[in-house]
Each structure stands twice: as structure tokens, then as C-alpha cells.
Image (tube, grey):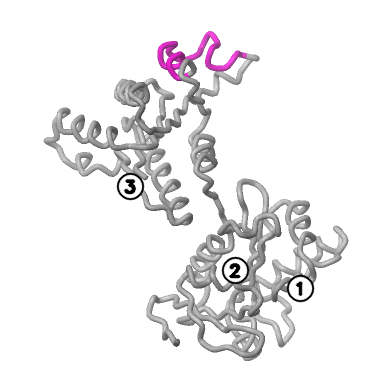
Amino acid sequence: MKIYIVGPLFSEAEEKQRKYEGERIRHILDLNHVDYELFNPVDMPFNSKEDVTSSEIALADVQRLNEAEAVFFDLSTEDSGSCVALGMMMEKLANGKKLKLYPVIHDIRLKRNSLGGLESSCGFNSMVVGILKGNKITIYSSFEEALQAFLHDHGWADLRLERIEDVAMEQSYSCYQSFDKDENGFQNDAYGLSMEEYKKFVERCVMDSKGIDLPDWKVPQTTYMLMEYDHPVGIFKLRHYLNEALRNGAGHIGYGIVKEYRGKGYATMGLALMIQEAKKIIREDEIYFSIHKDNPASLKAQMKNGAWIDHEDDEQYFTRIALNGEGKKHV
């Protein structure tokens, strides 16, 4: 897929916004293992040249716009170049080209004093608004809103990890209570707790992450919720180092995905995010895992993240993922 970002670059704020947009799109598409090319004008080498001509810029833009299959537009300032690009894309649509447009028009005035949105007295150029609405193209009020529509159109997920203490108590509680006490090796330590008991459980999770008042058999562990939009879809536990029991058992990371989200690649994506967190904390060369043999989906998620089977017993596989890219792979 070829994606193009259109928007002005006439201020530090606009330059920062274009960079943010590029980073957000790349992060999500990489996480979803999408084959893509992203063109962001802020990354053009022309921006560091003093002798670049308008013709050079226009030719580069036109070439990439003609190749684009999805285009994000920031039309909030009615930047003339962005409006020209919009006109070009509307012509592509009129000629039956495969293309998805995600225009953003944002103005806080449109929410004041019961004003009627883009059609209000302080609305935007009627030609720009009218041509989009006339072609039944949704106008978004923010880049994030447009991005979520883009992901929905293609069935891709926008996931992130949040520490359990940073997630709304009711949401994390509901997530935990959706799991059985033991699901394919994922131990639900909050199983059957009341809300009051669960609040103390979260407090204990915070203390565990800081290594406070740990029993001798336990190591520091940080608990994360895997979030999609504003709700948790999984639980991930990261042990900061291993004792002998963990080294020959559960390993560094334990995780579970909420039942209704299984089979959608969330474990693979969540684990990819977890590995990035692990690199910040774990000082060993490899991440250790154990997986029940009746849980092939979990094994597949690990393999997609570079794991290999180090050894096995009658019930479990013991896998490894190299943090430095040079692990000892065993067959």
C-alpha cells in the first residue's frame, strides 16, 4: 500500500504534527505487518536544500500523489497546496481510480455557542467542504479520528501497552474477570476478587514492579494491559529478571488475550510491544518463555516475533527470543 500525507509545513507546530502523523502511521502498520510505502513531505530531502525550486517540489509531490492509494489531508488552514492536492485526488476518484481519502478540518470555533459544524457561519471554504460532502467523503475533526477510520477500513489494530495502575480500575477489573483462573498456563492472580479486593491487588502490582516487600521466591514484575483504543484486550506480565524457578519454568513474560479478541493477531502484536519494553528492563541476552503444548496459537505468536524452541518436556515447549538478535537457535 502507498500512503501520502498532505499538509502545510510553514511553522514549527505544523512540522511537528507532520512528523507525528508519519510516526503514528508507521508504528501501527509495522505492528500489523503491512507492506507499505509512506510518503511524508516533512521527510523530503528538499527541506534541507536552499536552492530547491517550486517545480522540483511539485514534480515530486505529483508523482507520489498519482501513486497513492490512501491520502491523509490536513485542510484546517486551507493551505493552497493542500487544496490543489485535494483537487488532483478528486479527479483520480472521478476517473475510477482506487483511492481512499481521509480529510481533516479542525477548528475549535466550530464547537462553540451551538454552531452548526462546518456549515456554520465560521465554517470553511464552501468549495472544499462541498466537494467532499458531495462525494460522500467523511470529514474528520482530527488526525487521530481519521487514522482510526483508516485502520477500520482495512481491519488493522491500534494497540499499546499501559501499566495496570494507569488504566481505569473498572476496565482492568473487567478484563481480569473475563479470564479463568488458569488458561493455557496464564495464571489469573485476580480471579474471583471483589472490586475492593482488586484495588488492593493493583496496589500490590505497583509494589511488585518496584520490588517492594517481595517474598524470597518472587522477582520484580510489571503488569501491563494491552489496550485497543480505550479498552483492555489483554494482560501482559514482565518479570525483570529470573530466579531458578522461573528460568526452568514460566520465564520472563506471561500473557493472555481476552477471549473475544483471540485469533486476530493481538497476541503477536502485543508480544512485539512487550519485547520493546523488555529491552528497556531485562539485562539478559534472551527472553525465556514456556508454552503449554495445547496452545499452538501462543507458540505461533512467539515464532512470529523471532522465537525458537530451546527444549521441551511432555507438557510444555520452552522457547527463547534474542534481545540482541544473536540468540543461540536450537532445532
* Residue position for label 3: 37
- Left or right of 42 in this view: 197: right
**What residue is rendered at 53% in x and 46% in y?**
155
175 in relation to 120, above or below: below
Give the label, 1 or 2, closer to the camera: 2
Give the label, 3 or 2, closer to the camera: 2
Query: Toward which corner of the image does residue 237 lie, by quadrant?
Result: bottom right
The segment highlighted magenta reads 115-132
Q: Earlier in the sequence, mark 3 or mark 1?
A: 3
Q: Earlier in the sequence, mark 3 or mark 2?
A: 3
In the displayed orientation, state which residue is furthest to the front: 96
Q: Position of residue 135 (x, y in %)?
A: 46, 19
| Disc number placed over residue 297 in the picture, else none | 2
**What residue is rendered at 64% in x and 73% in y?**
295
**How far apart are labels 1 and 2 at the CA level?**
16 Å
**How far apart are labels 3 and 1 at the CA level?**
42 Å
Residue 119 lies in magenta, yes or no?
yes
**What residue is rendered at 58% in x and 56% in y?**
264
Q: Amino acid at mark 3?
A: Glu
Query: Toward which corner of the image does residue 235 lie, by quadrant?
Result: bottom right
Q: Position of residue 96 (x, y in %)?
A: 36, 26
Q: Position of residue 149 (x, y in %)?
A: 53, 37
**What residue is rendered at 34% in x and 43% in y?**
2
| Disc number placed over residue 182 in the picture, else none | 1
Q: Amino acid at mark 2?
A: Ala
- Left or right of 166 in this view: 199: right
